Amino acid sequence: MPLIIVNKGDGFPRIILNEPTSSSAEVLLYGGQVVSWKNERHEELLFMSSKAVLIPTWKPPKAIRGGIPVCFPQHSSSCLLLFGNLGSLEQHGFAKNRLWSVDSNPSPLAPTNNQTSVDLILKSTEEDLKTWPRSFELRLRVSLNDGKLTLIPRIRNTDSKAFSFTFALINYLYVSDIRDVA
């Protein structure tokens, strides 16, 4: 299916993925972040904070609260025991606060029947190199197939030496009543 890129007037271009079963997803180019995933009954499956309302006066580099943020090259300070500390980087890294591009030359991944997908890419910039002096390419494939949402991240070291990093996708799932969650 062809990509549908729209701007809802909030200043954030997004890609709309639709599939024959009527499920859909919205992916912002800002942060490479999935901000909506709806099933075939058009029920929203991702939580977005009321503080995440995207309005035209909102300016980067503030992170968007909810959906599925991409955390790279550092996860959170609360996870130091699991992920380690990469120094003075902002919490959850900077990928969530950068403008990504549609990847015109995506790495080959095996397609599945009836899959609708988009491939995004984030490359290190001069600004990034000031805070984290490593060159990289971060690719993210977001796919819908039979109502299932799949995210496949791939990180390529384009630097002349090895580097360490942490990576996470944080899923904010919508629940109708938090008291029913165990």
Image: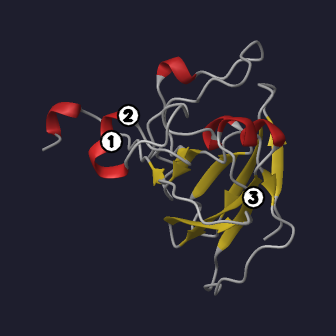
**Residue lying furthest top:** 57
Amino acid carrying label 1: it is: Leu
Q: Is 67 situated left or right of 26 in this image? A: left
Disc on the earlier residue, 3 or 2: 2
Task: State the residue position of label 2.
Answer: 77
Q: Residues within 10 Å of mark 3 (few under 14, many from 20)?
A: many
Amino acid carrying label 2: it is: Ser
- Position of residue 109 measured from the top left corner of the image (x, y, whole percent): 66, 83
For residue 39, which numbered disc appears in the image? none
- Taking the spot 87% from the left edge, 67% from the top edge, the residue there is 104
Q: In whole angstroms, how far apart are the C-alphas of marks 3 and 2?
A: 25 Å
- Position of residue 84 measured from the top left corner of the image (x, y, whole percent): 37, 47
Is there a contact, CB below 8 Å, between mark 2 and mark 1?
yes
Q: In whole angstroms, how far apart are the C-alphas of marks 2 and 1?
A: 5 Å
Q: Say which element carries label 3.
A: strand
Is there a contact, CB below 8 Å, between mark 3 and mark 1?
no
- Position of residue 19 measured from the top left corner of the image (x, y, whole percent): 64, 66
- Taking the spot 64% from the left edge, 87% from the top edge, the residue there is 110
Task: State the residue position of label 3.
Answer: 121
Task: State the residue position of label 1.
Answer: 80
